[in-house]
């Protein structure tokens, strides 16, 4: 079985500060890992994905995530927060092509001016 | 560039009424999903369909049925709506690399 744990349901950062959203996964096979973002009253959209290529993955809007197998982690970072980054972020895992996707419970990011 | 289209966007039902949420994707994806999203609980999988002609239960299937009508369409039916089914429902489809594409959601209220 696969699962995802997101640490912290709410994270607040100041504008310009580092953003760090934590995700740990469990998977019996090498996983596919994803971060999605959801803005208010919208569906989810893909920020970035890891599919067993480079361990440091760059996504849209300046976000990146690093796959660390030894720590079973896939934390999302951005060097400098912008007001427009305020949203809910979801980590997700799948066990390979065409396999079911499992989502974490989400982390709401607040950016303080 | 339609992607995943869900209808309706909003719906209010009385307890005991039935309804079907429609979902269609134009990306030729094999897999399709129905999730519900509730505050503090993230996305919970109701049903999914790995390919045309197959459906499987997810975490919270009780009170719901699905139909994979063809490769494009995957509908979710509430036979007898209950207030506990008040939620936002999302349909999604995935490519081989399991990147999920989501619809805009259906906000359902059961009174």
Image: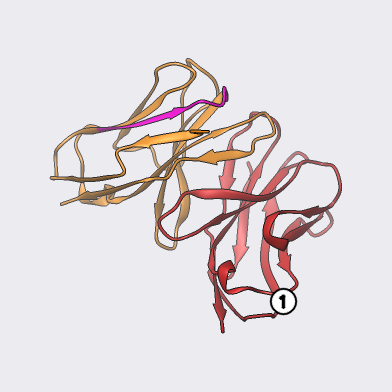
Chain colours: A red, B orange
Q: In this view, does A107 lie above or below A28?
A: below
Residue B23: % across, % down: 40, 31
User: Which chain does the numbered disc 1 sit on?
Assistant: A
Asked if the magenta segment contains residue A51, the reply would be no
Q: A87 or A4: nearer the eye?
A: A87
Q: Is residue A80 above or below residue B65?
A: below
Residue at image location 57% in from the left, 22% down from the top: B28
Residue at image location 41% in from the left, 52% down from the top: B37
Residue A100: % across, % down: 59, 35
Q: In this view, does B20 lie above or below A102?
A: above
Residue at image location 64% in from the left, 39% down from the top: B99
How many numbered circles are shown?
1
Packing grade of label 1 (10 A; few <14, some 14-19, many >=20) is some
Residue A87: % across, % down: 52, 65
Q: In this view, does A93 lie to the left or right of B34?
A: right
Q: B65 or B7: nearer the eye?
A: B7
Q: In this view, does A50 lie to the left or right of B18?
A: right
Q: In this view, does B13 lie to the left or right of B71?
A: left
Q: What span is colored magenta in the figure?
A: B20-29
The residue tagged with tag 1: helix, strand or loop? loop
Q: Mark 1 points at which residue?
A: A18
Q: Main secondary structure of the magenta part?
A: strand
Asked where in the image residue B68 lies, by quadrant, the reply is top left
Asked where in the image residue B40 lies, by quadrant, the reply is bottom left
Residue B2: % across, % down: 48, 33
Asked if the magenta segment contains residue B25, the reply would be yes
Residue at image location 52% in from the left, 50% down from the top: A44
């Amino acid at each position: 079985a696969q699962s995802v744990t997101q640490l912290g349901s709410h994270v607040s950062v100041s504008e310009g500060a580092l953003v760090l959203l934590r995700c740990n996964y469990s998977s019996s096979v090498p996983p596919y890992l994803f971060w999605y973002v959801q803005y208010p009253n919208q569906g989810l959209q893909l920020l970035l994905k890891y599919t067993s290529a480079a361990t440091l993955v760059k996504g849209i809007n300046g976000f990146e995530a690093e796959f660390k197998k030894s720590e079973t982690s896939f934390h999302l970072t951005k060097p400098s927060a912008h007001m427009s980054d305020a949203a809910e972020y979801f980590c997700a895992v799948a066990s390979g092509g065409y396999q079911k996707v499992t989502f974490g419970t989400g982390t709401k990011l607040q950016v303080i001016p | 560039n339609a992607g995943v289209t869900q209808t309706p966007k909003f719906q209010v039902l009385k307890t005991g009424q039935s309804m079907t949420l429609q979902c269609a994707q134009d990306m030729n994806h094999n897999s399709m999903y129905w999730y519900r999203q509730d505050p503090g609980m993230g996305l919970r999988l109701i049903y999914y369909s790995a390919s045309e002609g197959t459906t499987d239960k997810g975490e919270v299937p009780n009170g719901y049925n699905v139909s994979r009508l063809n490769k494009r369409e995957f509908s979710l039916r509430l036979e007898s709506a209950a207030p506990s089914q008040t939620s936002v429902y999302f349909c999604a489809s995935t490519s081989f690399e399991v990147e999920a594409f989501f619809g805009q959601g259906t906000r359902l209220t059961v009174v």
